[in-house]
Image (cartoon, helix red, strand yellow):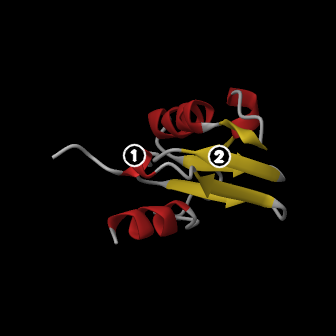
Amino acid sequence: MRLTRALTWIFLVISLSSTDGAQTFDVRQFGATGNGTNLDTRAIQKALDACGRVGGGTVWFRPGIYLSRPLTLRTRTTLRLDGGAILKATDEPKDFCRAM
């Protein structure tokens, strides 16, 4: 059940608050490949962190398949996935289970 929730959550496009006029952070400029094979977690997290440091904005995904482990979003962050962009969780259950 926990794994199902984690996998479902990562597919959501989350808008935590309005970011009108805010900066846009292209995950590819932070090193994401969007090829569906390479893990893009670090690049996506770098884009999310940069967005958070300036007080919010939009983290943008161009078309591609972005394979990721769990991510941390801050307030005032919008994820924008263009048509053909997929944010996909890894198939590894251990990526979503915390040690108790």
Quadrant of the frame with the N terminus:
bottom left
Q: Which residue is found at the position 64% from the left and 37% from the top?
A: 40
Secondary element at tag 1: helix
Q: Which residue is found at the position 49% from the left and 63% from the top?
A: 7
| Residue 82 figure quarter | bottom right
Secondary element at tag 2: strand
Rendered location of residue 60, percent (x, y): 70, 49
Q: Which badge, 2 or 1, is on the more N-terminal residue?
A: 2
What amino acid is found at the position of numbered circle 1 in the picture? Lys
Front-lying residue, 38 or 12: 38
Q: Which mark is residue 67?
A: 2
In the image, residue 90 sits, relative to residue 10, either above or below, namely above
Please count the marks in the image: 2
**4 with respect to 77 (left or right):** left
Rendered location of residue 91, percent (x, y): 56, 53
Give the crowd class for mark 2: few <14, some 14-19, many >=20 residues within 10 Å: many
Rendered location of residue 61, percent (x, y): 73, 49
Q: Would residue 61 be visible to someone looking at this image?
A: no
Rendered location of residue 73, percent (x, y): 44, 49
What amino acid is found at the position of numbered circle 2 in the picture? Leu
| Residue 28 figure quarter | top right
The residue to which callout 1 is attached is: 94
In the image, residue 24 sits, relative to residue 38, either above or below, namely below
